[in-house]
Amino acid sequence: MKRYLILLVFLMFLSCGSNTSIVSSWRDPKITVAQEHFKKVLVVVLLKDEASRRVAENRIAAGNAIFKTSYQYLNETTSNLTKEQKLKILQDENFDGVITMRLVSIDKETNYVPGTYTGMYYGGFDGMYTGMYGYGFGNWYGMYSPTFYDPGYYQETTSYMVETNIFSLKENKLIWTGTTKSEYVTDVGQTVDAIMQAVVAEMRKDGSLPKK
């Protein structure tokens, strides 16, 4: 199996940390991720919180030796360098690809979840009738009184829009980009897994990676 497939196969973890789906994607029609045969890829997660950044980058880098976290190469010691100087660092370190993740927006939506109401079946109070409406009051009350009314409530859902890009340093260009929407986020690491799982599925769909 070629190495480019190993590049992203490990990302197909089973994850229940969030509900994640692809919102939009684009790929360079002239080149695919598979054609690049990446051997050393920098992982860049742009988060203001340094601890979360490291957790996310480590999560991806732990899957394969070709992935390297950006904080090892682009950190406070390189913050004042020009983009050309930063690019030269990557070239000198023999990087041929870069994966970036960036939080685009956080959206909150409030939805009303209606309650449930169990109406009375009018079938006679003494059990004289039979069939669907033949319950006597005692049977009816025993069946429905515990759950006679379940009140509705408002539920707030937070959605995280994340942009994932794949750059070829050899071609010096963006070759794939996609935006994902994640809900019910409880863990940064598991959410990263879910995002990359969605990304891999989309790249297989659009031909950037071979199908299984």
Image (cartoon, grey):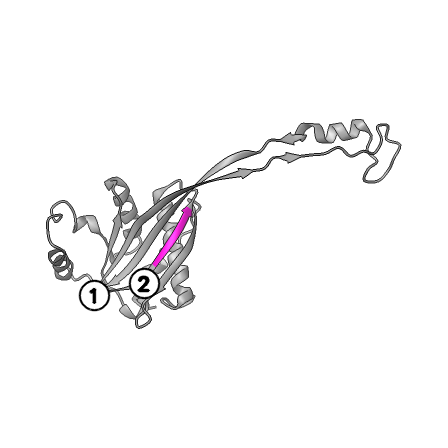
Where does the image place residue 76, in percent across and percent down from the top left?
14, 44
The answer to whether 118 appears left or right of 14 in the picture is: right
The answer to whether 117 appears left or right of 64 in the picture is: right
Kindly identify which residue carries mark 1: 172
Residue extent of the magenta highlight: 178-182
Residue 62 - label: none
The kind of residue on which mark 1 rests is Asn
Q: Quadrant of residue 132?
A: top right
State the quadrant of the C terminus.
Answer: bottom left
Cα separation between marks 1 and 2: 13 Å
Q: Quadrant of residue 39?
A: bottom left
Where does the image place residue 32, in percent across and percent down from the top left?
32, 69
Q: Local crowd at mark 2 within 10 Å, few (<14), some, or many (≥20)?
A: many
In the figure, 106 relative to 148: above or below? Answer: below
Q: Nearer the viewer, residue 38 or 53?
A: 53
Where does the image place residue 145, in percent across and percent down from the top left?
70, 28
Residue 7 visible here: yes
State the quadrant of the N terminus.
Answer: bottom left
Kindly identify which residue carries mark 2: 176
